[in-house]
Amino acid sequence: MMMKHNVQPKLSAYEQEHQLNAQIEAYWDERSRDFSKLRQKELSGPCAAAWQAYLQEKLSAAAPLKILDIGTGAGFFAILLAQLGHKVTGIDMSADMLHQAKQNVLAAGCSAEFRKMNAQELDFADETFDVVISRNLTWTLPDVMQAYREWQRVLKKGGKLLNFDSDYGLVTFSRKEDQADVHANIRQELVTECNDIKDELRISTHRRPQWDAQFLCDLGMQVTVEEEIAPKVRTDKNMQFDTLPLFAIIASK
């Protein structure tokens, strides 16, 4: 007698990306509370002032600018930019992260708007924002090319894109025991899942920021790259960040 096997149908590219997005969203939902505590610690230390000074230098324009903070997470950039007098909208695909962001903005005594949204599918009209900003997000996205196209689309003519990230593609994350480390207290299961997700992403196969700069140039943007800004913004000796260079991409439309 022949045995019948249940063969799972192959997912389309769209279905695979949808499934990966759902996995990424669930991962950050679970990380949201501990991640928020990390950002609160950063906000209360010297990193906040260092970041604020750096951002003010790069924006080089009087407030208020209309700014889109993509992948706002626990609202770190949203708070710093709102304190500088800018009108900030923060988006994130994690509802739990947005809950943390709203609480942190309230505690900081400033205001920002938050919306649940996919960084690759922005629900905004063309040329809505003066500035689009993002930190440590692009390495987590299934389709960074589509994200960059969308970010350029919602920028006003002459607007700026600021993206801060590291080249995590060749890195294998590990659990940290040192309580001063920003990756401490993460369960091994989550570390493993983070590595699994990262290794599935196309961006992990590119070397950065060279790839990003070339793609944005191909989109017609004027691009400046700073290969390493960590010494300028990671100024808290009580917080141990990863040792990879933190690059800055400043692109004008």
Image (spheres, helix red, strand yellow):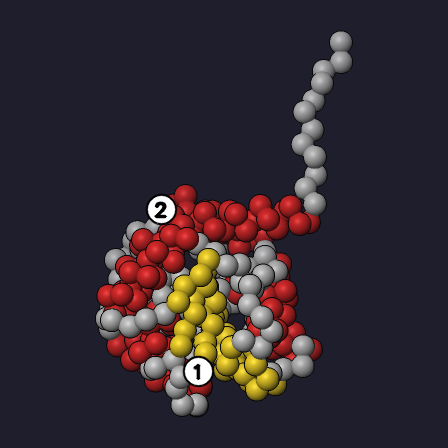
Q: Which residue is mark 2?
A: 187
Towards the viewer: 243 or 92: 92
Say whether residue 217 is visible.
yes
Q: Which residue is mark 1?
A: 65
Mark 1 or mark 2, earlier in chain: 1
- The residue type indicated by label 2 comes to Arg
Q: Which mark is residue 251?
A: none
Towards the viewer: 230 or 163: 163
What is the quadrant of residue 83 in the picture? bottom left
What is the quadrant of residue 181 in the picture? bottom left
Mark 1 surroundings: few (<14), some (14-19) or many (≥20) residues within 10 A: some
Q: Quadrant of the N terminus?
A: top right
Provide residue 241's location: percent of width, then percent of height: 35, 67
Mark 2 surroundings: few (<14), some (14-19) or many (≥20) residues within 10 A: few
Q: Residue furthest front?
A: 125
Camera-side mark, 1 or 2: 1
Residue at 39% across / 67% down in the picture? 113
Provide residue 209's location: percent of width, then percent of height: 56, 74
Provide residue 104's location: percent of width, then percent of height: 29, 64
Instruction: Tell me how far mark 1 sits from mark 2, CA to CA.
Output: 39 Å
- The residue type indicated by label 1 comes to Leu
